[in-house]
Amino acid sequence: MSTALIILAAGKGTRMNSDLPKVLHPIAQAPMLAHAMQAGSALNPDQTVIVAGHEAEAVTAAVADIDETAQVVLQTEQLGTAHAVDQARAALDGFQGDVVVLYGDTPFLQPDTLERMIAARAKADLVILGFQAADPARYGRLVMDGDNLERIVEYKDASEAERAISFCNSGLMACDAELLFDLISKVGNENASGEYYLTDVVELARAQGRSVTAVACDEEETLGVNSRADLARADAVFQSRARAELLDLGVTLMAPETVYLSLDTFIGRDTVIEPNVVFGPGVTVESGALIRAFSHLEGCHVSRGAKVGPYARLRPGAELSEDTHVGNFVEIKNAEIAEGAKVNHLSYIGDASVGKKTNIGAGTITCNYDGVMKHQTEIGANAFIGSNTLLVAPVKVGDEAMTATGTVITKDVEDGALAIARTAQTNKPGRAQKLMDILRAKKARRDGGKG
């Protein structure tokens, strides 16, 4: 059976107090919409339709970055959830199969839950996703008769007995496409808000003699994000889940609560992560690596056996081969560090390649930017770059070459050569004391004048 997703992402999110569309606010360094789309992708949908509204251009651009095959349709007027789903009618014209309706601000659905919804659809015409609420509060209640969902009752309309029900409506559903759009065409807006509510399709389906059921999931899966406080809670939920998953997969987290992960972070087993490490988007760490405390990684690849940190920063394009060392207060950007190479102290390596088993001394800087363009530095294998070397790109240092401490390299260094480029030292006997006397006298005059 074919499956299509409709993800509602048109809301402004007034309570977020932001110019950014609600669904683009990040959880784990990715728009919450990306989380919803990733959850839906577990069904291998034939079509994905995103219903955008507020700041639709920004939402459309984000969707293209997440899944270029997804379609975006517009809800130009915010007339309710049924009206929003109806905007996907044309995009799904001729589609035959099940439609699953998700929300762009509900990021934590699990693949198993969606699969159970599809399995339930094989036996019922309409499937609603519900959850057992710890505090049902003002959620809509799902009134069940065995496996049959009789109706959804809003809190304000519920009797005392119905308010005692803890099985609540998430708003998500699965239905045959043709039936869903038929039911939506019959939804009215005779209510206080004058909106077309998707939940009304349950009553309409029952009136047609259709079978309606509900599938239950954990309440955490239905967590919606409507405010900055909700956003913070959602990120905490993600981090807790992601850390637990890494521990189960054989990754050592020495202080799990201090490690922050992104939606796409991948870490292989037997890797050790020390406290206070942040993984930005696009990070892959292979098995058996060591990421030491207070390091920040984004857009990089760390190979097996590599050691990073403490206090290291790997920026986009950093590629660390096996058994490399990147030490304290080192920054790597758009650079390849070959197998066994070491950049251990206080250095910046950007737009560069470093050969096998090369050692980069403390305070080394690749001077890669001329104010307009970036330039490349190439360092060969088994080279030794002396401390406080400045490599003014574009420049090449050959295999087994050396640079002297304090050298400024502006020309290529051939294989096996020693490069020395620094001003000759001159000592002036007795001048230090004379200079200090002059400076102290000058300071005394200045300070006395203030009095």
Image: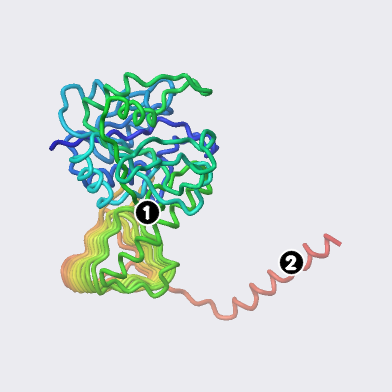
At 25% from the left and 50% from the top, the residue drawn is 111
From the image, tell me which residue sits under label 1.
Answer: 218
Residue for point 47% across, 19% down: 190
Q: How is the image coloured?
A: rainbow
Position above or below: 133 against 288: above
User: Residue 112: where, in percent of width, then height?
Assistant: 25, 52
Callout 2 environment at 10 Å: few (<14), some (14 to 19), or many (20+)?
few
Return the residue nearer the eye: 1 or 417. Answer: 1
* Residue position for label 2: 443
- 71 vs 438, left or right, is left
Of residues 411 and 185, which is closer to you in this image?
A: 185
> Which residue appears farthest toward the bottom when viewing the image?
429
Specify the quadrant of the image occupied by residue 336: bottom left
Which kind of residue does numbered mark 2 sit on?
Answer: Lys
Element at label 2: helix
| One can see residue 417 in this view | no
For image coordinates 23% across by 24% down, the residue present is 91
The quarter of the image holding the N terminus is top left
Q: Which one is nearer the viewer's eye here, 360 or 6?
A: 6
